[in-house]
Image (tube, rainbow, N blue to C red):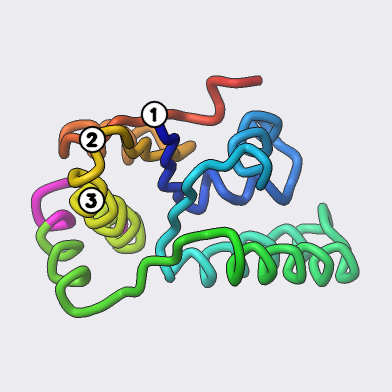
Amino acid sequence: MVNAYFLDTSALVKRYVPELGSNWIQSITFPAAGNFLAISQITWVEVCSAFSRRQREGSLSVDEVDQLMEDFRTDFDNQYEVLEVDRTLIETAGALVMQNPLRAYDSVQLASALRVQSVLTSMPETQLIFVSADSRLLNIAHSEGLAIDNPNNYP
């Protein structure tokens, strides 16, 4: 079985900034693990926001953020399957946000994961796991038929 993961930003940031669940995220995103890793195009903006917020709060220096952004750019360009945000995806996200108590970008993340899952259904040996540190989003993703995991369950 091929391991496939859709990583929302709350999970992906743990790859770059040490916090609860970072070791597990690093283990599944390590290139030698050979896992299929998908993210939404909007993750770029959210990761930039997360790093910048940490810099403003003083937990990361300018140099650290520069290095993290360089690392993230390399991974974004070479390791992740980046789902483009198009009209159909936005409309799906709009429907999800109308039906569920989701923040706007969370609905785009979930719509992106659902699109990946629909593509992977033709590959029965591959199961997509939606990874997030947001329990509310995970519950909604599960109700939408996705397998889920929370990196915070792996101290």
Determine whether label 3 and label 2 are within 8 Å by CB. Answer: no
In the image, which disc is placed on residue 81? Answer: none
Q: Between marks 1 and 3, how big is the CA–CA gap? A: 20 Å
- Residue tagged 3: 114
* Above or below 134: residue 45: below
Marks 2 and 1 close (CB-CB < 8 Å):
no
Work out which quarter of the rendered image holds the C terminus and state it. top right
In the image, what residue type sits under mark 1? Met
Instruction: Identify residue type, mark 3.
Output: Leu
- 122 relative to 13 in the view: left or right: left
Name the kind of residue labelled 2 in the image: Pro
* Magenta region, residue range: 96-103
Which x, y percent locates residue 60?
83, 58
Query: Which residue lies under the disc numbered 2?
Result: 124
Asked whether the beta carbons under mark 1 and mark 3 sit within 8 Å of each other, the answer is no
Is residue 25 shown left or right of residue 43? right
Q: Say if 65 sits above or below 17 in the image.
A: below
Give the x, y percent position of residue 87: 18, 79
Find residue 143 and report its horizontal and vertical position in percent.
16, 33
Q: Relative to the observer, which residue lies in front, 33 or 99?
A: 33
| CA distance for labels 2 and 1 | 9 Å
Compared with 105, 137 (above or below) is above
Residue 139 figure quarter: top left
Name the residue carrying label 1: 1
> Which is nearer the N-term, disc 1 or disc 3?
1
Question: Which image quadrant is residue 104 in?
Answer: bottom left
Instruction: Bin the neighbour count of mark 2 within 10 Å (Cα to Cα): few under 14, some 14-19, many 20 and up.
Output: few
Give the residue at x 59% y 63%.
47
